[in-house]
Amino acid sequence: MPDPVQRLAVIGGGVIGLAVARRAAQDGWRVRVHRTPAPGASWVAGGMLAPHSEGWPGEEQLLRLGLASLDLWHGGFLDGLPPEVVTARESLVVAVDRADTADLKTVGEWLAAQGHPVTPTTAARDVEPLLAQGIRHGFRAETELAVDNRAVVDALAAHAERLGVEWAPPVTALSEVTDADAVVIANGIDAPALWPGLPVRPVKGEVLRLRWRHGCLPIPQRVIRARVHGRQVYLVPRRDGVVVGATQYEHGRDTAPTVTGVRELLDDACAVVPALGEYELAECAAGLRPMTADNIPLVGRLDERTLVATGHGRSGFLLAPWTAEAIAAELRVREGVTL
């Protein structure tokens, strides 16, 4: 374990920053998290832990990272968090038309070639009766999970605080952090402002929350991902309803939900599960994912004192445990050395 006097500053209070802070505190570091009160990308995420169903040929490295991190979710990352943060324990991926079915076949064959096969089905409505008539083809990813993103953020913060993590206001320059032996930049799309040249850009994603109402059909018990005429939509169970997402396009730092984006999500969601049309439209929101050109996050050391953990894109919640372990390993390299 590091010397108890070693101090770590984590800049960013989303799921990545909190996971890094908690892991470092468990290793004996004295940790301070600089965070903003404004909600960020973690607050509007779907919370899917889905390396199989989000995979695509050409993203082999991201698949490997995602599978390793999913193992960590199953293997202990949830320790110290309330069990109800997990909202689903399987994903069902389905196709609406023939072209969508061909895409799913491509993904399934690619996953099998990587040694990580999924379970195909031609009777998807037997698995999930809420699906629209005519939806037959898909596959099941039985080990995937979904979590309540907001509950996870709150629970990680509470667990970190029990471990002695302290809170501080955000910073606008690394020079403001004068009393830390090591610094982790984990503030998503704002990371390049602290370290110019980091190849991270904001990508907008709209998310809807649909609330179950008395008399409606029940909430799905598994994540449902679908390809709808070439577009992707996901339906993620929550205790009181379903999260629907997500659009993806580049529009600077605009976080206003658009009529077109919301309409497409609602149309696609109801095309997959018609019963959702009777739910309450409880929230429309948009967040900015920190993306890299190859979708691989930036996790590692920048200089003797500074580390980075950003660029997780659509996989922030999935990759939080892997990121925390990777940063912890970098910090252990300096064990017993004054940074």
Image: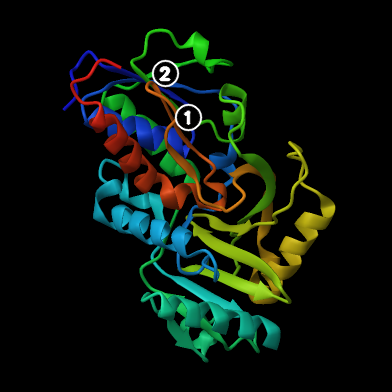
Report the amino acid beneath label 1.
Gly
Q: Quadrant of the N terminus?
A: top left
Q: Nearer the viewer, residue 129 or 29?
A: 29
Labels 1 and 2 touching (C-beta < 8 A)? yes
Q: How is the image coloured?
A: rainbow
Judged left or right of residue 230, residue 223 is left
Q: Quadrant of the C terminus?
A: top left
Count neighbours of disc 1 (C-alpha within 10 A) and say few if under 14, some if 14 to 19, many if 20 or more: many
Image coords of residue 183 (percent x, y): 41, 22
Circle 1 residue: 13
In the rendered view, tell whether residue 230 sits above or below residue 79.
Answer: below
In the rendered view, tell whether residue 70 sits above or below residue 338.
Answer: below
Q: Secondary structure at mark 1?
A: loop
Q: Do we see residue 186 in this rendering?
A: yes
In the rendered view, tell whether residue 308 sits above or below residue 225.
Answer: above
Q: Do we see residue 218 in this rendering?
A: no
- Quadrant assignment, res 88: bottom left
Looking at the image, which residue sits at the far bottom? 122
Q: CA distance from mark 1 to mark 2?
A: 9 Å
Circle 2 residue: 167
Image coords of residue 299 (percent x, y): 44, 40
- Residue depicted at 39% across the width and 49% down the height: 85
Q: Nearer the viewer, residue 305 or 161?
A: 305
In the rendered view, tell whether residue 50 sits above or below residue 1.
Answer: below
Image coords of residue 101 (percent x, y): 62, 85
